[in-house]
């Protein structure tokens, strides 16, 4: 059995991909996290093109994980705790459709699971406002430029990393201490 037979992929947009990558990179059961773009109409877009908001792409992470260690549902539960799924086309000061909250499902099982988790989290009333996370079929994924890879890990003292990403990572670590990679 190959590694690809034992892993699954989740494609998630929760605002800036630097933030989501930093969290999922530390999660036990995650094999890899790749920042990129999905959901738009332009093939092989650049970061500059996506930032205009005119490509239709969202900044996303592709999370490859071992379902024997962490379930898709738990990946989604964590996703919903590390970004605000109630703000349409924005996360904090990052504004535009490229920062939308979105789950690109890869098959019908993922679609059903995502709908179930959204319903579950909505019923728990964790958020004051309704969840606006888009649920869309996966089409294509385009890797982000190399300088985005492990951005937080490679640039911890950069202003955005200290002010925006570090608090999200700290919150994740405190809530999911038992799920961190050693």
Image (cartoon, grey):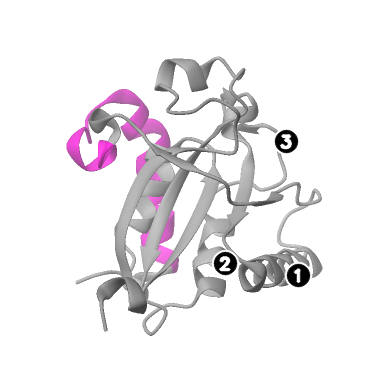
Q: Which residue lies at the image location 53% right of the left edge and 37% below the top edge?
A: 15
Q: Which image quadrant: the C terminus?
A: bottom left
Is 158 on the left-hand or right-hand side of 51? left
Q: Nearer the viewer, residue 47 or 124?
A: 47
Q: Which span is picked out in magenta?
A: 149-175
Q: Which image quadrant: the N terminus?
A: bottom left
Q: Which residue lies at the image location 63% right of the left edge and 44% below the top edge?
A: 101
Is 35 on the left-hand or right-hand side of 14? left
Q: Residues within 10 Å of mark 3 (few under 14, many from 20)?
A: some
Check residue 53 for magenta coloring: no
Dot 3 or dot 2: first in sequence order is 2
SS for dot 3: loop
Q: Residues within 10 Å of mark 2 (few under 14, many from 20)?
A: some
Magenta highlight: main SS: helix
Dot 2 or dot 1: first in sequence order is 2
Query: Compared with residue 45, is residue 164 higher up or lower down, i.e. above or below?
Result: below
C-alpha gap between disc 2 and disc 1: 12 Å
The residue identified by callout 3 is: 88
The residue identified by callout 2 is: 77
Give coordinates of residue 103: x percent, y percent. 61, 53
SS for dot 1: helix
Check residue 171 for magenta coloring: yes
Q: Residues within 10 Å of mark 1 (few under 14, many from 20)?
A: few
Dot 1 or dot 3: first in sequence order is 3
Residue 132 tag number = none
C-alpha gap between disc 3 and disc 2: 19 Å
Give coordinates of residue 10: x percent, y percent. 49, 60
Q: Which residue lies at the image location 34% right of the left edge and 65% below the top edge?
A: 27
**Which image quadrant is residue 109 in?**
bottom right
Give coordinates of residue 4: x percent, y percent. 32, 71
The residue identified by callout 1 is: 124
């Amino acid at each position: 059995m190959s590694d690809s037979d034992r892993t699954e992929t989740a494609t998630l947009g929760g605002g800036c991909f630097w933030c989501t990558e930093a969290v999922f990179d530390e999660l036990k059961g995650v094999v890899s996290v790749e920042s990129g773009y999905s959901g738009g109409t332009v093939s092989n877009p650049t970061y500059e093109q996506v930032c205009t908001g005119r490509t239709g792409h969202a900044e996303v992470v592709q999370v490859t994980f071992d379902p024997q260690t962490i379930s898709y549902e738990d990946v989604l539960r964590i996703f919903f705790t590390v970004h605000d799924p109630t703000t349409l086309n924005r996360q904090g000061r990052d504004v535009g459709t490229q920062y939308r909250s979105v789950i690109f499902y890869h098959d019908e099982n993922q679609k059903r699971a995502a709908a179930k988790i959204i319903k579950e989290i909505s019923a728990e009333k964790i958020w004051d406002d309704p969840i606006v996370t888009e649920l869309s079929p996966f089409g294509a994924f385009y890797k982000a430029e190399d300088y985005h890879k492990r951005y937080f890990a490679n640039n911890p003292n950069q202003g955005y990393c200290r002010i925006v990403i570090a608090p999200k990572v700290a919150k994740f670590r405190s809530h999911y201490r038992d799920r961190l990679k050693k």
